[in-house]
Amino acid sequence: MALSWRSSALVAGLVLSLPGEALAGMPECGDVRVDADADCEVELGDACGSSCGQPVYTQVCSTQQYDRCRSSCTIPPDPACTEACTASCDERCAAGIEIVCHDNCFPECTTACTALCDTAVDTIQCRAACEATCDGECDHQCSMLPDDATCVTHCIECCGGSCVAAANMGCQLDCQTQTWAQCETEVRGGCEAACEDEGALFCDGQLVASGSEAMACADALTRQGIAVDAEGDVHAFDPPLGCGCRREPGGHPWASLGLLGLLGLRGRRRRALTGPWPQSRTDPARGSAAPMY
């Protein structure tokens, strides 16, 4: 399916999109994007096993698949896209509009994901792969900015990240589709295996991390101000406030998770981060992406 994003729509998105608050690229969480207002919970035992049995792996698999496919999806951005970025950024920043690369790039890039995936055979997988590609390319592009970067530099890199994502979107979707089912099987198995020991971390109904990675991710999220509730056996522990994410000899790994004493200790569940979208499978005949704004 050929994409029809236009440069004029791309640069308009720089003005219309509001900065998005989210945490992306956190290594403790496997680089899975977590919204700043996400409902996150740690689950153990039966509750955890039940959650692992649900289709909650789209974000984890799309993030892992994007990283795996990036080495082969290296199409340069369309020059028309990057030229439109430069012209628009000069104009916008001169008008006093504030552009922050990490805040603006992802929401602007993903504006095209709905149209791209509406007619896909598997819309859920398509949407997750599209968002992961936007997230990854934006993160790579924005991470190169110096601390004292100007508005124009932020704007150009922000727009440029979407241009790279657009150019490689067809390649990424095709590449990720090839091993998607295998990824879901492996991730589910790891999630279920972790439920009886270290548990799993879910945010807005999607798996974020399991096992030892879940503990490290939860600690990283609490340091960023995102509350992590606890379910199951975690209720039995009442750690001292402010302690680090450290496992004491012979102790349960979640017994030392900082801030658990401040939490409601009841998991909350909202919509999955990637849906819902109609169930169908992705059309393999896609053209390379055009500008996404």
Image (cartoon, rainbow, N blue to C red):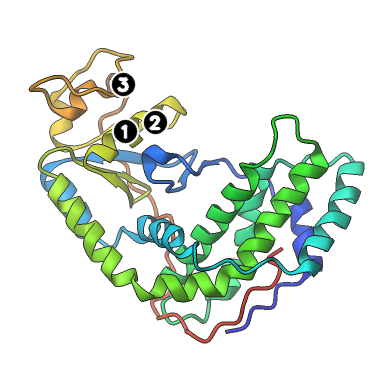
Amino acid type indicated by mark 2:
Ala
Q: In the picture provided, is 163 more to the left or to the right than 94?
A: left
Residue 31 x/y as whole percent: 43, 46
Name the residue furthest bottom.
285
The image quadrant of residue 196 is top left
Q: Is residue 239 above or below residue 140?
A: above
Foreground tag (3 vs 1): 1
Residue 199 x/y as whole percent: 19, 41
Mark 1 → mark 2, Cα distance in angstroms: 6 Å
* Quadrant (top left, top right, bottom left, bottom right) of the N terminus: bottom right
| Residue for point 69% across, 73% down | 290
Q: In the picture provided, is 12 more to the left or to the right than 50?
A: right
Amino acid type indicated by mark 1:
Ala
| Residue for point 22% across, 58% down | 188
Residue position for label 1: 216
* Quadrant (top left, top right, bottom left, bottom right) of the C terminus: bottom right
Q: In the picture provided, is 233 more to the left or to the right than 280?
A: left
Amino acid type indicated by mark 3:
Gly
Foreground tag (2 vs 3): 2
Q: Is residue 234 above or below residue 77?
A: above
Residue contact between numbered discs 1 and 2, judged by CB atoms under 8 Å: yes
Q: Nearer the viewer, residue 19 or 24?
A: 24
Residue 206 x/y as whole percent: 34, 52
Q: Earlier in the sequence, mark 3 or mark 1?
A: 1
Q: Which mark is residue 220?
A: 2
Q: In the picture provided, is 230 more to the left or to the right than 118?
A: left
| Residue 19 seen in the figure | no
Q: Is residue 12 above or below residue 230?
A: below
Residue position for label 3: 258
Mark 2 → mark 3, Cα distance in angstroms: 10 Å
Mark 3 → mark 1, Cα distance in angstroms: 11 Å
